[in-house]
Image: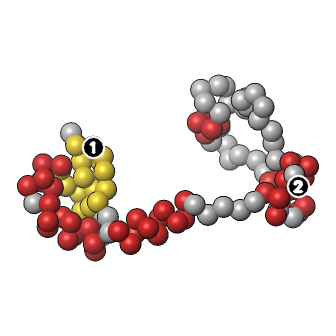
Amino acid sequence: MTTTVTAAAVSKNFGAYQDAAVRDPVIITKNGRPRTVLLAYEDFVRLSKRDRRVELTAELSADEIAAVEASEMEPGLDHLNDELFGSKPAGSKPSGAKGLTAKNAAG
């Protein structure tokens, strides 16, 4: 079970929380808000590897490309476009941005 503690508590008894983090992540709060997580090194390595998994678009089949092109965003998630493309209005793309097409994926 994940433990949540204050930064002051971790500071006073780091060794105990370090041992606890080997079993389960320890969420450390500052001013009542989660700020950092103390976790086992093995968990960090596992999570880091997941972030680095890369697949080349050139290796996608025509069916996979067609599926991506035909996909639509679920209603209510348009705000995610703002995060992807900066603070521009939803649906706009930065200059030079291209959609994924068979031509783009192939080369």
Quick check: 20 above or below 65?
A: below
CA–CA distance between discs 2 and 1?
46 Å
Which residue reaches farthest front? 107
Quick check: 8 above or below 49?
A: above
Image position, residue 55 (x, y; %) = 71, 62
Answer yes or no: is residue 1 visible. Answer: no
Between discs 2 and 1, the one toward the N terminus = 1
Q: Do the residues under discs 2 and 1 have CB atoms within 8 angstroms? A: no
Quick check: 9 above or below 47?
A: above
Q: Nearer the viewer, residue 57 or 27?
A: 57
Residue 82 sits in which quadrant? top right
The colour mode here is: secondary structure
Q: Which residue is mark 2?
A: 106
The residue depicted at 79 percent of the width and 57 percent of the height is 57
Q: Nearer the viewer, residue 100 or 72?
A: 100
The residue depicted at 19 percent of the width and 55 percent of the height is 5
Which element type, helix, strand or loop, lies under badge 1? strand
